[in-house]
């Protein structure tokens, strides 16, 4: 894609489907956007309140508490050991959610105005947006390109949004080797890493993938889904200290600072596993019910082995499927939002209340 202008904001095109779905007598079931609806765990709010006396500016580097907690979470949950989370050259930073980091990473790394960013064939739109904002071109590819000419950054996404695909260790290692061979940073968006269902997601920073160093690698994580805290805008970037330091240096010049109370909430969340398991149980039960109903209604679910979505097809144009669901009062996201390879699929989010999930199940199986 040319780097001349931003793409249209995709969600605007769903307005007709939303209007049709609104006519259902039992109301709309909106499964189009993956925004959490369950209460934020109390431990986050308590930590936020305790740190609310925050008269001074936070630092872009983050508090020692949040970096220590992040390193502990990465080690405990993902088997990743950071180089030195409290060192003068950072290996982990808090970010204002993960979307801000995704959208700005090419700019933060100083890549603006030259080269190409490789993104997955079916991809979260913000990877493309971040490249366009930086004046870069985009190449969609699920395998390392034959030529590295002009490539300045690679985005991986596992578990993937929208399709829930989990990359194997061999696939991850192939990208790591390619990036290191050509001196191209490889960045993995792993914000759904705690939500594996039919597969166990592996971080690109895991020693079985990265080896004994994180050279050339970054991983992006988020508390939005695993901690039901999208409104807190709490994310992390970690990995190669040289790359993290470049991100940190630019962020502090730009004043991209995570509020001190939010950092306290992050430290509390990253130190606790029970609330994550609770969220997993909620989403897993919703997934089981919705997937069975979708299959019974004549649709096929592909990939979807992890994450918060079902990737659904009837082997027809995605907008026809969107309209079919809208007739049942259900709003879903067309796969075309995520690239040409998604044009015969729709994405259904698990982020609805049990009552709304059950309403969708009833409509699909009636």
Image (cartoon, helix red, strand yellow):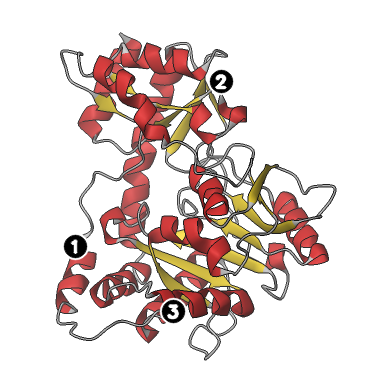
Is 364 displayed left or right of 166 in the figure?
left
- Vertical side of 143 occupied by 365: above or below: above
Q: Return the disc, 3 or 2, that comes first in the chain's sequence.
A: 3
Structural distance between the alpha carbons of marks 1 and 3: 34 Å
Name the residue at 32% across, 67% down: 269
Label 1 neighbour load within 10 Å: few <14, some 14-19, many 20+: few
Residue at 77% x, 54% y: name it: 174
Q: Mark 2: few, some, or many residues within 10 Å (few <14, many ≥20)?
A: some
* Vertical arrangement, residue 264 with respect to residue 127, above or below: below
Q: Name the residue beneath numbered marker 2.
A: 344
Q: Earlier in the sequence, mark 1 or mark 3?
A: 1
Q: Which residue is mark 3?
A: 253
Q: Nearer the viewer, residue 139 or 45?
A: 139
Q: Where is residue 139 drawn, in percent x and y?
A: 69, 44
Q: CA distance from mark 2 to mark 1?
A: 41 Å
Quadrant of the drawing holding the C terminus: top left
Q: Is mark 2 in CB contact (under 8 Å) with mark 1?
A: no
Identity of the residue furthest to the bottom in this view: 88
Q: Position of residue 346 (x, y in %)?
A: 47, 25
In the foreground, 175 or 318: 318
Asked where in the image residue 149 lies, by quadrant, the reply is bottom right
Element under disc 3: helix
The residue lying at 45 percent from left, 70 percent from top is 73
Q: Are marks 1 and 3 in contact (CB under 8 Å)?
A: no
Q: Residue at x 79, y 47 (%)?
A: 145
Q: Which residue is tagged 1? A: 42
Q: Which mark is residue 366?
A: none
User: What SS does tag 1 mark?
Assistant: helix
For the residues marked 3 and 2, what is the alpha-carbon distance in whole angstroms? 43 Å
């Amino acid at each position: 894609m040319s780097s001349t202008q931003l793409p249209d904001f995709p969600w605007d095109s769903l307005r007709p489907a939303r209007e049709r779905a609104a006519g259902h007598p039992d109301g709309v079931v909106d499964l189009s956007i993956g925004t959490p609806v369950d209460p934020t765990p109390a431990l986050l709010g308590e930590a936020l309140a305790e740190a609310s006396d925050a008269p001074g500016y936070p630092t872009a580097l983050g508090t020692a508490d949040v970096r220590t907690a992040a390193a502990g979470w990465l080690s405990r949950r993902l088997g990743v050991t950071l180089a030195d989370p409290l060192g003068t050259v950072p290996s982990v930073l808090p970010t204002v959610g993960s979307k801000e980091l995704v959208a700005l990473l090419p700019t933060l790394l100083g890549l603006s105005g030259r080269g190409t960013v490789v993104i997955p064939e079916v991809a979260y739109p913000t990877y493309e947006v971040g490249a366009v904002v930086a004046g870069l071109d985009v190449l969609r590819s699920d395998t390392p390109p034959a030529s590295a000419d002009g490539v300045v950054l690679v985005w991986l996404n596992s578990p993937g949004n929208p399709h829930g695909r989990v990359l194997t260790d061999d696939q991850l290692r192939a990208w790591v080797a390619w990036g290191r061979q050509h001196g191209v940073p490889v960045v993995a968006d792993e914000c759904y890493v705690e939500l594996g269902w039919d597969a166990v997601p592996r971080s690109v920073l895991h020693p079985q993938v990265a080896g004994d160093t994180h050279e050339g690698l970054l991983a992006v994580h988020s508390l939005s889904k695993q901690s039901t805290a999208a409104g807190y805008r709490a994310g992390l970037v970690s990995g190669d200290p040289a790359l993290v330091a470049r991100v940190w240096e630019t962020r502090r010049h730009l004043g991209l600072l995570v509020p001190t109370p939010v950092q306290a909430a992050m430290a509390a969340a990253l130190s606790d596993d029970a609330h994550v398991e609770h969220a997993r149980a909620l989403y897993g039960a919703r997934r089981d019910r919705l997937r069975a109903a979708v299959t019974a209604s004549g649709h096929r679910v592909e990939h979807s082995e992890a994450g918060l979505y079902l990737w659904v097809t009837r082997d027809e144009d995605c907008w026809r499927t969107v309209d079919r669901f809208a007739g049942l009062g259900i709003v879903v996201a067309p796969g075309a939002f995520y690239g040409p390879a998604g044009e015969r699929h729709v994405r259904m989010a698990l982020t609805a209340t049990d009552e709304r999930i059950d309403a969708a199940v009833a409509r699909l199986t009636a």
